[in-house]
Structure formats: C-alpha cells, structure tokens
Image (spheres, rainbow, N blue to C red):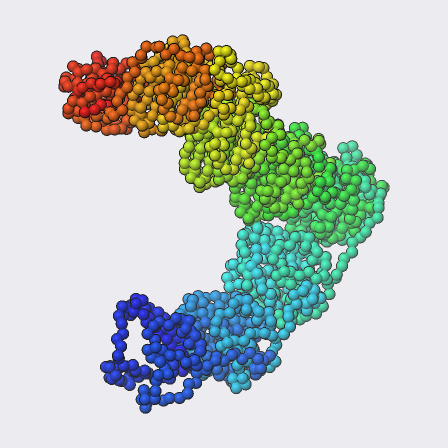
Amino acid sequence: MAVNYGLWHHLCITWDSADSGRYKYYKDGNLKYTSHNLKSGQTILGGGTLFIGTWQASVGGGLSKSYSFNHEVTGFNIWTELIEEEEITEMALKPCDIVCGNAVSWPFFRTSDITSAVTVAASDIVCVPEEPKCSDGSFEDKMMTFDSTSEYTYALLDKDIRDIWSFTSCWWMRTKDTRSTYHTMWSYFAMGDSANVGSIAVENPYTMRVSIKNQWGSSSGVAVNYNMWHHVCITWTSETGTYEIYRDGGLAYTQTGYSKDKILRGGGKLMLGQRQTKVGEVYKNKAYSYYGDLSDFNMWDSVLQPGEIKTFVDNRGCDNGCGDLVSWMDFTIDSLTDVDFNDSAAICKDRVKECGKGSFDDMKWTLQTTSSEFSYAAVRQEIPTMTAMTVCMWIKSTDKTSTRYLYTYRTSNINTGSIYLYNPNSVQLYIDNAAGTASGVAVNYGIWSHVCQTWDQNGGTYKYYKDARLRYTNKNLRTNYEIKGGGTFVIGQWQGSIGGKFSTSYGFNAEITKFNMWSEALEDTDIETLFLEPCGYICGDVILWSYFRVDDLASVEVEEHGLQCEKERKVCNKGDFTGRTWSFDSSAEFTYVTVPEEFHDIWKFTACWWMRTNDVSGAARAMFSYFAPGDNYGSIIAENPKSLRAMIKNGWATASGVTVTYGLWHHVCLTWNSDGGQHDWFKDGSRVFTQQKLMADKMLKGGGKLVIGQRQTRSGTFNRAYSYIGDMADFNMWDDVLFSSEIADISLDRGCNNGCGELVAWTDIKEKDLEEVTVKEDHRLSGCSPREFKCGTGEFENQIWKLDSTTDFSHAYYYEPIPQLESFTACWWMRTTQTSSSTYIFTYRVPNINDGDITVYNVNNVRMKVNNQWGTNSGTNVNTGRWHHICVTWDNEDGKYQYIKDTNIAYEHTNVKKGQVIDGGGSLIIGHYQGSVGGGLTKAYGYVGDITKFNIWSSVLAKEELQGVAATGCDAVCGDVVWWSYFRLDDLSVIKVDDFDVECAARIKTCSGGEYDNDTMVFDSTNDVSYAVVPIVLPVLEKFTMCWWMRPEPTSHPTTSTPISYRTYSNTEGSIYIRNQNAMRLTLNNGYNTDSKIATPDGIWTHICTAWNSNGGVVRMYRNGGLSHSVINILSDKTIRGDGSFILGNTQTNVGGGLSKSYAYQGRLTQFNMWSGVLEGDTVEKMSRSGCINDCGDLIWWSYLREDDLTNVAVERYKTKQVTGMDFDSELYSKCKQKPTVINVPVPDMSDDESERHYVLCTDINDDCENGEFVGKAMSFTKDHEITYATVYKNIPEMSKLTVCWWMKSTDTTASYIFTYFTTKRALEAYNPANLQLLVDGVFATAGGNAYNTGGWHHACMTWDNDGGTYQYFADGRKTFSSLNLRPGTTIEGGGSFVLGQYQGSAGGIASKIYNYEGDITQVNIWRSVLAAKDIQAHALDGCSPLCGDALSWSDFTSRGLKGVSLNQPSIPCVMDMSLPDSGLCEVPSTLVNLASIAVVSQSSTRRGKNATRAVDGNRDIYIGGRSCTQTAFEFEPWWLADLGKTAKVYKVDVTKRKDSRSLENAEVRVGNNLDFKKNALCGSRVSASSIHGEAIEIMCDCSNGVDGQYISIHITGEETILSLCEVEIFGSV
C-alpha cells in the first residue's frame, strides 16, 4: 500500500488486542489489508512520547535522519477504540471536516509542538472531488489523427489520476493498419513502472493486446483495423485480475488472473498514440506509434456493465459517456503534439430498425477486394446465441475463385461460435468450424440469384436454397449445438481473428442486396415468399437489411439494385377435358395421347398430373415421355407407379421408392433444372424425392413430341411392357421449376384448379389427340368441392372405419402435407381381435426412413418407431375386442416417447432420436406398413379391425389434454397436423364405413344411480379371462384406502388369485397388487410386499379394506371391519405413480394387459371404492356392517362402472324381497319379548336356494344386541359338508381380559374347534367338545375336564385375565377349573377374524373338514372383562334372554357370514336345574411364585451343550435353534431334576416342550424329599398324547394344599428316547 507518489491520501490503521490482535490498513476509505496475532491480549502502556515523522530509539530520543519520513501531513488523530469502516470511509470522503480523536486530536497541536524543520502551510486538499468535465471541451465532436511517419504524434493529458483498482476505458478508432504490430493506441505510466511498458499499454489493432502493471496479456485475436470505425472498451479489476475487450459493444475477449490484487498508482500520465518510457515521455520507437484516427476517449474507475458499453455503440459517437477518471473533454490543444484534429466522422443519428426504412432498401452493394483495398461490410447488430438460423441474400457474381467467403461470423472460440459460407462455385456452410457438405449450388453465373442457407440444431439439419428451390439438404451438422452470440459478422471477407486478419485471397467479389438473417430455420414457403417479392421489404430478426448504413461499409460501392420485381403466369380457360379423366389400357390396342404443342429448347421444367392405378407390378410403365431429334432413349421419361423414376436427356435417375398405386388418386409432379441437375418428385403436394447432378448444364432440345401413356422409341413404336395402365387427368407442363407452395396449392385443390402449363396446358388438348383412350365423366376427385378444415364437419364425424386386408389392401391415405415435426401426439380409437404381431396400425415415412418415419405396430404389444429407431415395447395389448383410446407421443428434446392406453401412461422412456426432427412431406397411411413412400404394402401386415377419431398434433399434449381427448367420446377432436374431419371417402381403399358405437356419454361421479349399485360381479376365467377395467385415471398417490366385498369360489391357484391390480408403465414406480386369498398380500411398486395372513374363505362374503400412507410407510389391512394386519416402512416417503390401469379380477404384466388365467380371481366382488386418504378404523367397521350401503370413494367409486368396462364378467341383478329379522317360537321363548322386524333387501334373480347365499350381503347388522338376525335361533354345524363355519363382521377390540360364553349341544367326539379367533396368530380358541380346552395367544391352558358332547344343551363359559394369566372354566353356571400363568402380561390383539365351528390357520383361513365342529351353537358373547361367577350363573339359569357382549354379541352374526350352516330353533330350557353334583372345583392360591429360579438343576445326560439350566432361563422359545431348550442323549428313561435346596409346597408344574416334539409322552412329574425321585409323589397323572395340546403343558400337583418336597423331577417312563424341555415353571411357596 504505497503512499509515496505525490498525491494526498487518507490513511487509517486499527488494532484490537481482544480480537486476536487483529490489525487493519485503510487507504482513502477502503480496507486494503488485514491480519491478526499482533500482540494479541496485550495493552499499550500510557504515559509515553508520541513523535510524528521519525523513529524514537528511546523515550523521546535516539532520533535518526535515516528513519525520518519526508511528507506532508494533516488531520492526525488517535482513538482508544475501533472506528467503524463506515466512519473511516466518511472521513476520507470529507477531508476538510474537523475530526477529533479522544487520545490524540489534530486541533490540540500547537506551533510549540513542532521543530523548526517542520514547515506549516495551508492545506491544499480538495474538499469536494472535482466533477468530470462532460461538455465544452476542445475536441467535442472532433477526432484526432495520428501519423508518426515523420514526427512522433501523441496527446499527453495533464491531469492528476488517482490510484486505480479497477477501470473501464472506451474510445472510437479507425485505422488502415493491416499489419500485426506494436502500434500503441494509448498508455498510462506512473512512478515505479517498468521502462517502456508502464501501468497500462494498449496496442496492435490487428490483434489487440493489453499490458496491466507491467504484465502483458495474450494476443486477443480481436481486430479493429481495415479502415472502419470501431468502438473499443477495455475493462480490468484488481480483485480477480480479469480484463475484457469489447469490440463494437460485444464482449470479444476475456482473460483472468491478470495482475490480480495489484494497484495502479496514481500521479502518472496518460498518453494517446504512443507508448511511454517514463512518466510523460514518449518511447522513441515508431514501431510503437499508432497510425489512424481516435475519438471520444473516456476512462472510469470502475468496471462498466455490458449494457452501458453497448449504449455507447448504439449512439455511434453521439453520446459516449463521461469518464470519472479521464473525460474526452479533459484534452486541450496543449495536450497535442503534431496531432491533426478534424470534425468527427460519427453519424449522430439513430439506427433505422424498421424494416423498409433503411439506407439501402432499394440499393445494392458492389464488393471488389483488390491487392490494396479490402472491400467488405460489417454487421453492427449484436448477434445472439442461436440454435437455428437462416441467411438469405440476392447475389450476382462472376467470381470463380473457390476460396472466396461470402460471409463469416466468429467469436473468440471459433469452435463454439462461428458461421461462414464458402466457395461461390459450390457454396458450403460451416457451423462452429464444422463443414457441411458442399451444396453443388453455384452463385457465379453473372445473373441475380436468391440464395438461402438454413441450419437447425435439431438433427443438425442444414439446407441450401437457390431461387427458392431446395437444392440440397443433409443432417448431423453440429447436432444439439448452439452458436454463441456476441461475435463479429462480416460480409465479403474471411475473419482470421475477431473482425480481422483479412486476406485478399478470400475476399468475395459480387453484387449483394437484401442481406438478412433469422434466428430460426425458415420454412420453404417463407423462402419462396422472399424470392417472389425481390422488391419487397422482409427483414431478419438477427440481421436486417434496413439497419445497414454507409459507415458499415469499407471500399464498397452503392447503387440501385435493378431486380425484376414480378413474374406473371399463364392463365387457362376451360378445355375439352376439364372435370374429366382419361383411362389407359393397352392390353388390346395401344392407348395414348399425343400433345399437339411445339416445344422450344428446355433448360428446366415442371410436369404435374393426377393419376390412379392398381398396378403394383413394379414394371417400367410410362406415364409420359418426351422425345426430341437425336435422342437415344428420349429427352424425358416418367415411369413406374410403384417406384417413380425419371430419365432426363438419356440419363436415368435413381428409382425414388415413391409409390402411387393401390387404387387411390394421387397428384404427381416431376421437376428438373439444368442448373445443378436437380430433379424432384412431388406426391400429393409434398416433395418426396430429390436427386442432384442429373444431366447438369444440359439442354433438352426443342422440336420433339410429348406422348402421355407410352414410352417412345427412335422408331416411333411402343411396347406394351411400358404402357401405362390406369386413369389420368389434368396434365400440365411448365418451362420453369414451380415452387413447392405452388405445387402444394394445385394438389390441395383436388383437381379444381390445376394450374395452367406454359409448355403443355390440359385445356389445350383436344379429342383428336387421343388414341383409344377412354374418357370418363365421373372421376372421383371429390367433385372439386373444397376440403373441410373446420373441426367437426367431416364425412366421418359419427362413423367408424372397418379395415380388413385379408383379401385386399385395406388402408386410408392422408393427402394433406405433413410438416416437419420436432414432437407429436397421435391419438385414435380402435377395436380389434386380431392376434398377429405383424400388424401395422399406421405408418408415416419419407424416402430416407432415417430422416422421417413414424410407425405404430403390433396389437399384442404396441410398439412405436421414430426415424427407423424402435422404442421399447409398451407392454400394452389392444386386441381385446373392446374400444380402446390409444395415444403415442414423442419429443426430440430428450427423445422421450410415451404410450397411452385409455388415458393411462402404459410406458415411457427417452433417447429415441434425441435432438432429431421428423422430415415433412412424407406419406401417411392408416392400416398398413409402407415398404416405400406410399407403397410396398403387404397384406400380412394389414390391420384388421375398427378405427375412428384419428388425429395427430405437432406437440406433446399435456396429461389433462389427453384425458380430455379420450373423454370427449362423440365430440369432435382435431389435431393440427392430421384431423379426423379432413378425411373423405376418396381417401379410403377397401374400407367399410359403419355407425359410430364408441361410448359417448360422459360419466358423472355419483354414489348412487350406477348400473351396479346393488349388483355383484361374477368373475370366472375357466374358459376366457374374466376382468373389469376401472376407467378412471388415478393421480400420484401418497396414501390411499381401498375397500370391497368379495366371495371367492374354489380355485386351483388361490395363492396367485388377484382380485385387484393397478399398474403404470413403470411397475417399480407405480403398481398395486392384492393377491392370495389364503393369506392376502399387498404389493406396492413391485417390490414392497406385506403378507397379512388374512384369508378370504371360499363361499362366504368377506369385507376387505387396505390402507397405505407414505408417511412412515404404514400399511393397514382390515377384515370384516377389524384391523387384522399392520406394518410400517412399506414404501416409506415414496409415491405411487399415477396414470395407470386399474383392473378388477386379474393381474397385469403390462399396462392393461398381460392377463392370465393363473392369476385370475374366481368368485364374486362388489362395492369397490378407493379413497385418496387413510380412512379411520370406525369408518371401515361401519362399512363392513352396512352391507350394500357404502361410502363413495373420491378416487374410484362403484357407481362409476358400466357394462362396457366388463369382459367375460357376469352380473347378478337383484330384486327386493322381504326378510324377517327374527323367527322363533314365542311360547318357547316366553321371556323374549322381541317383535319380528321386516326389512327390504335386494335379492338376485335366481333360485331360492341360490338367493339365500347372496341377499344377506345387503342386510344391515343391527347394533341393537337384543334385536339381531339370529335372536332365538341356533346355528347347526355338520361334518356332512366339505367345510362348515360361521364368521362375524365385527371389529373385535384388543383385550387384556375376557369372558366368553355360549350355549352348545353336540355329540361330537372328535378334536374339533368350537370357535377360533385369529389375529396375526392364534389368539383365542375353544377346543374339543369332549374335554373343553382354552387357548390364549397361541398357548393352550389345561383342559377343564368338562364334556359338552352329551347330546344335550350346555352353557359354557371361559374367563382369562393377563394379570397373572389366571383362567377359569364354567360348565352350566358352575366353576369347574381355574389356574394361572396362561400368557400373563399378554394382550390379545384386536381386529382379527372370529369363526364358529372351524379352525383358522390364518385370519379367515379355514383349515380343513377334519376340524369341522358338529352340533348346535347359540348365544355366543364375549366381554372385555372377567364376569363374576354369580353373573355367569345367572346367564346359565336364564337361557332365553339375549345377552350383549361388549366385544362380541350374538346379534353381530348375520346370514352373510354362514358357510354350510343351517338355522334351527333351540330347545334351551329357560330355567336351569342347579341341583347338579359338585364338579370338584380346584383353585390354586393367587400368591404362588415360580420356584424354578432358585433351583439347582441337572439331567441324566447332555447332548451338544443343551444343558439342564436352559429349562429355567425364563425363555419359552420352543425352537431348538433358539438355544433355550435342553436335550439328553437317546437313552432309557431320561430325566431332569430340580433341587430347591429346602422343602417347599408345590401346587403345579408348567412345562413348555419343544416345537413338534413327542418327547413328553409318558412323562411323569414327581415332587418329594427323596433324591431317588421315583419314590416321590406323582403330580397329576402320566402325560399322554391326548393331553398334549400345543407346546405348553400344565401338570397339577395339588391345587388345594400343595405337595411338600425339595426335589421336582420330570422323567420318561418305560422307553428309550430323548428328553427335551424348553422351560419348566414350578409354582409354589417356601
């Protein structure tokens, strides 16, 4: 931070001991440097001596001149605190304000404080900074001219310049200097700078270079010479070391890291025109002198924004800003040394930006570069970044030199920003330094030619046009590139650098006018308009001709252009064959037409005609021929309708591959031009084939003969092999090449206006010119009626096409020209049962299938191809025999394509022809494959089926638009490329038309009024796949709930049975499957599964709800209203994609398809609804109890479905029948005062037996427990049926204690199940009528010893409490048994499945007929409490009164839950006889403890480490792999022994055995004080196989008084085996 170069500076220094010794230097209000650790934590002592200007070696002394500072100083202050940066800045900006420090204050100083060596004078600091001088200067509106040929010429500015941290300098300059030199435009030199270089030097107009602080930058490649005014700006900032060069307002060069963090000292001198060797001294070397003009030099102490710099250029010298460091007005006459000055050459008026108002609108330029002069024009408009472009101009030239450049554009990096057009012999386009193919287009014939070039990054497509005709096109020139903007555009010269390095070898000599540039690729019709209006004013959006003015030209002459402004066409009147056709058939006689016209020499021509033929032979049949004297084969032949081919001047062209056969009318044109030898075929208004260099520069002689329908020979004879067979009309021929737009107009007029040929006119041909030609009056060219372009007014608005190529080529052809496409959507309705995988639904193609092709193929698995690249199979079949709405889309931005079926996205992917375009002008055929353009049809590829509403759009329709297109039904829909309303009968070949039968009526969401409100769908895929499509589009799902009723039927594949499937094109991003009626499984996004263990048994209605929430991935599954399964982390924080296909009754392996009998659901289903949220449990339970009355889903609602949605699905339609709610003998139930209730319920139209199985679904469950459907009735179960049981539609709550009671009558001697309750496991069961046994939470209690199979009615109750695991049995009101430790602390889960009469292996999973209970049951109730014994006795005594369990009530049962169960009226006595003998109730004390924890244990032997202590480790794990079970060796009478250490009272022993082990059969448990345990007392009885129910076994010793003993043993008696125990619990007291 230097302060020693003669300028006033404001300095501040701060230091803070507390802030890590932080110190800072400020100069002129700006922080220049900071660091820390300078005496951190220390203080500066007071009481010392302060000297200003020298060093003290001791306090107040030890001064030395060597350390004295010679300077001027004022305003010295010291503060004992930190001053904020804002205050320091303010002090620097206000140097004349008085400031006082609190430690040292400048006003405190006196004369006595200074020595005689100190001079005191008035301060000369400028109090207010001088405003820059912006007007009234010596050189306002002037320019300086520098020429150091004899003397050194320069301008030296006499002005103090302050320190420079950043700057912008701008000026105007003009020089003819064309050499790479050191010529210096200006320099700035300050003290300390290196000699001959300085702080700033700007040199070399040929390729500008800058030096900053003695560091030279690289050569920029930016040229500002060649005798044209240029505006130049240089910017630099110390902070990043970045400097920039702007040329004519555009950023042309940038360099970084250049003199970074350096300062340019003030106090130096600025010099124009020379480099300095010292401050203000010229470097005496003329090699560094500037030669040329310079004006409006300004310099700022900041970096100006690009927009500000561009403003100076737009003002063209009228307003160049005013620099705050240096202003142009600062220069005076005294500043100049031998410098001439003159009026400025700047044009101080605005540029013309309005088309047609410029200086050269009706003028031309003549460019003529010589050895001494460069003739060119510079474009002053800013060139933007472009992804496409068009350049057009009129040119007249005779320049044959191939190295000429018509124009060039370039940026600093020629590979990312350049365009140039090269070689007038065969113009060739370069984009970003990559060469396109030479065009073959010459522009040097000495006549005016209109020339255009286009380029588009999409596909890298580029085209050359001459006189509005497309002469050449190709692709892959800088595909997906963008041409960087901000460069320099020059007309008539090559740029070796930005705006410079010209060469006389490359200068193009020509006349040019109407030069324009666009930022898009213009269409053919736009280019034709430019050509047809040469005197009109059409301007580009990038470069417009009207913007140019004279100061943009260097050595260019200007004069009027003299273009011919208009060309007239011949007009024809009505002729003999207007509105008529000719028919040719030479099978017997030669048929032909000889045109009577006399022909002059032909350099170019167009021939057009209408034709129709069925000739698919591929023979060289000639539509017409022209033969002139001296020809060998002829001058012109047009032949072969299957692959159009031309011959010109005895030279055969390539076969075009374009077909005009298959029985439809086609408009055909052939063009040829000697210039370049280009010939084109047009079909139905579109160019479909182009070939170059066919007899280029040849002339067709006049005086020949033109024959239509035959090929001519030199001998004048014909050959039937070449005779045309078919119809023809409206033949015309011109001696010019018509524009494509003119040809398109003729084609679209459909024979009403066919033009008027100048060589041959249709109206000039007479009857006498025909030979054996049949004339028809009724040809089908639509009777000259115009096509309807109004949507909804076509011939087929309410009709369908029926295509069948079995015997003929059934197809439709679209006559309107197809434009070039960057994206598209095609949609149609279709219906087919065709099974062929080779079916083509529609095809579009151009001659080069790689440039223009759309193919949609395969009704089994729809697939699309774009430009000969296949997309992936959609996985979608459309051959179901039903109407489907199909759409395909494609976009070139990322090559994304989609298949949409019935508004659902079946599949999508990317990278099909990314960045490419589909060429226009091709042939669109519906119903067939095209092997060539419009031809190559094959019957095997023909579509067989119906189609309607076919449309194509030039964009990818949004999801909502696609849904709207599909939902409109009968409403008119029209694409902007192809629209259904356009088609007419003329366009169809072998297609029948029928009435429209697609579903039209829009569906309305309603929770009632649907077709199937009270109906059931019956799915049966025994023969054909049976399913229902839900035609609703789902959104992206973050959560959902689905509910439905289902009643499966027996199937061979229950585990794959799929009642519900939803699938999008990405199975891993969007799918929902419900499978497996034995144990329902929910699968989300094809990988997130949860198995519920919920079963839906055959033949019985089950209500299922499934809910999922992305938040936490929570899944809940409800069965009959109860939450039966819950799990988390299933697809957590993910979503399920929308737009998929929803199907009831089968799975989908692709969207809407891939159905299989192996996954078919067999049975009934009804009331399906889906919600976008998670329903509450009480809402689900309410639905399960309400039968047919369900809430209405907001995503899917049952009432929405119609008959059209069903495939092979039967429907049971209901009527209403009266059902009595209760029916019993009022005398028998004298205490039951219920009155029968009559309700109306839907009943299916079927037999009475069958109806009983279905109507019950719609019977509401009565929440009044005293008025249930089965009050006064008993259920009768039998083993005669395959499986009999009853289930209940009740959400059973969670229970920590319970009482369950029921009445039963049975003679069943088998181990059957009276009831089972299953949650995620066996939760509660009553087993074995012969010896009733309770199961809780998977563990059997000790059997109560009560037999209920005596054939009479018995009242049974069981209680359980998790507090201690206490349980009790009651028989006919009396307690018969109680014990404890049955799953203490356990809670029985809620939401499970409760079944009477059958075992469940899963929730609702009915096991087997062998478990069928046989007998009657009634009055089943469950309470969530342990009822008192007196209450249980009261219930047993009163057999008639209905009871109301709060967990389950008898009134909860309904007919819908019965399977093979009949109803009867029970003969239960209303008052029980209580004189029954005592059953020997045994109750153990409630204070017992498990003594096993204090025992020392041993066993007879130990196998593989499974020692005796495992039986007392507190772990009841029943699997041997769980390391909690003992095991002895295989031996005789193995034993296990517990030693309590002292005598205790033992009441019972609970043993948990190993899973599936028989090792406790014949076991004895003994208790006593004898170590020889066989002499001790036996507890209970020996364990038998019949007493083992599960793995938990309770052995009662003495429930009243206990058995005394120290030793407890378990041993197997009388056999050789192993003994394995998982837990032994010894309950007693010490």
Judge by depth and name the residue closer to the eye, 405 or 402.
Answer: 405
Place of residue 263 in the rendered image (x, y in percent of width and height, measured from the top left): 41, 73
Q: Which quadrant holds residue 389? A: bottom right
> Quadrant where the N terminus lies?
bottom left
Judge by depth and name the residue closer to the eye, 926 or 1048.
Answer: 1048
Place of residue 824 in the rendered image (x, y in percent of width and height, measured from the top left): 61, 44
> Quadrant where the C terminus lies?
top left
Judge by depth and name the residue closer to the eye, 1543 or 108.
Answer: 1543
- 754 to 1226, vertically: above or below: below
Going 25% across and 18% down the picture, which residue do you hit? 1599
Place of residue 1541 in the rendered image (x, y in percent of width and height, measured from the top left): 15, 25
Number of marks in picture: 0
- 551 to 1239, vertically: above or below: below
Judge by depth and name the residue closer to the eye, 60 or 295.
Answer: 60
Going 32% across and 89% down the picture, which residue do you hit? 112
Going 35% across and 17% down the picture, which residue do you hit? 1370
Q: Tell me if 815 is positioned left or right of 1074 in this view.
A: right
Which residue is the extreme one toward the bottom? Answer: 116
Q: Is residue 455 visible?
A: yes
Place of residue 1471 in the rendered image (x, y in percent of width and height, measured from the top left): 42, 12
Q: Is residue 1621 visible?
A: no
- 758 to 1275, vertically: above or below: below
Going 59% across and 32% down the picture, which residue do you hit? 1007
- 172 to 772, vertically: above or below: below
Q: Which quadrant holds residue 506? A: bottom right
Q: Tell me if 1493 is positioned left or right of 1385 in this view.
A: left
